[in-house]
Image: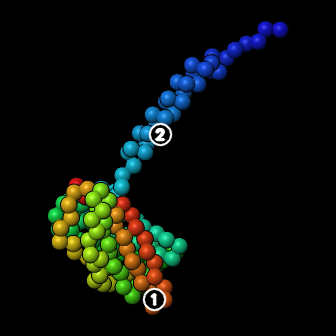
Amino acid sequence: MKQIKSPMTSPRNFAGLALVMAALLSLSVAATPLAAATDDDSFFTHLHTEKAMANVTVSPGRAGPVEIAIQLETTDETPLAAKAVSVTLVDTQSGRKLAPVEASRDGEDSWHVKVAQLTPGRWMLGLGISISEADHVSVESPILIK
């Protein structure tokens, strides 16, 4: 009995398929943004933990003075009335850490911070959220400043 070889099972085809899959995977990873850009050069990112979520908009998303708007939610997507919110920023390339800034309350679940000067590059944005006297949440996300 003669065994029939399928052209799809040859070692050369497996190697080619592996190269194509690796190329597609690298394209999808490279195309993943750190934050979603908007038309006005601001960006938005969503941070979450088991206890809290934050919708954060950095405006503008380029070097210079920026304003950071924060909207807090519970994991059920209802407004989260926190006692206090602080923001930390660390330049991931140089390791330079800006002094933590206490956010100002804009409403029940809205906060904002003004940062005098950010340089271009990758930064780690951290939020310290005080839900109550005994309940604190920390969350961070990378951001890119142009």
Q: Determine whether, in the image, residue 89 is placed left or right of residue 80.
A: left
Q: Which residue is mark 1?
A: 132
Q: CA distance from mark 1 to mark 2?
A: 43 Å
Across and down, in percent, residue 99 comes to: 26, 75
Q: Amino acid at mark 1?
A: Ser
Q: What residue sits 33% from the left and 79% below the top?
A: 86
Does residue 54 appear in the picture of this structure? Answer: yes
| Viewer-proximal residue among 118 and 82 | 118
The quarter in which the N terminus is drawn is top right
User: What's the residue at 54%, 30% (across, down)?
Assistant: 18
Q: Quadrant of the C terminus?
A: bottom left
Residue 141 falls in which quadrant of the image? bottom left
Left or right of residue 129, residue 88 in this image:
left
Which residue sits furthest top? 2
Q: Furthest-front residue in view?
A: 95
Mark 1, Cα crowd under 10 Å, few <14 / some 14-19 / many 20+, is few
- Above or below for 130 versus 10: below
Q: Residue at the spot x=40%, y=67% of the render? A: 140
Q: Image quarter for residue 101?
A: bottom left
Q: Which mark is residue 25?
A: 2
Measuring 44% from the left and 85% from the top, which residue is drawn there? 131
Amino acid type of the residue tagged 2 in the rendering: Leu
Label 2 Cα neighbours within 10 Å, binned few <14 / some 14-19 / many ≥20: few
Residue 77 visible in the current orientation? no
Q: Secondary structure at mark 2?
A: helix
Tell whether 91 sits left or right of 135: left
Q: Position of residue 116 (x, y in %)?
A: 17, 71
11 is higher (above) or lower (below) than 107: above
Marker count (numbered):
2
Vertical position of residue 58 compared to residue 135: above or below: above
Element carrying mark 1: loop
Instruction: Tell me which numbered mark, 1 or 2, is placed earlier along the sequence.
Output: 2
